[in-house]
Amino acid sequence: MGDVVRFVSKSELERARLIREARAIYDSIFPPAVPDRAPQEGEEPPGIKN
């Protein structure tokens, strides 16, 4: 009891769908960085600057 049902307009659903689609395209072009990747030979660990 006491649940609230929120009305979501078609335009809001379409906006959310377009944002998800754009994010998927962006991630396919620019994959998110993998923070736990081991540094390659000759590469400094992230966060170390000379």
Image (spheres, rainbow, N blue to C red):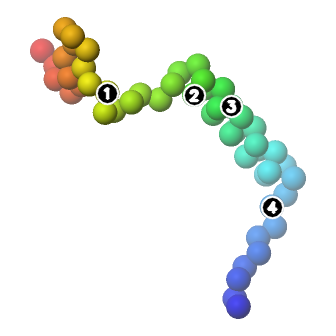
**Which of 9 and 35 lies nearest the eye of the viewer?**
35
Residue at left offset 58%, top offset 19%? 29
Does the CB distance between marks 4 and 2 fall below 8 Å?
no
Quadrant including the N terminus: bottom right
Write down the residue under mark 1: 37
Sequence-earlier tag: 4 or 1: 4
- For badge 2, the amino acid type reads Asp
Residue type at mark 1 is Arg
Quarter of the figure with residue 4: bottom right
**Which label lies toward us, 3 or 2?**
2
On screen, residue 27 above or below 49 = below
Furthest residue toward left: 50
Which quarter of the picture shows residue 43?
top left
Residue under pointer 2: 27
Residue designated by label 4: 8
Q: Amino acid at mark 4?
A: Val
Which residue corresponds to mark 3? 22
> Which residue is located at x 81 percent, y 45 percent?
14
**Label 1: which secondary element:** loop
Left or right: 14 with respect to 27?
right
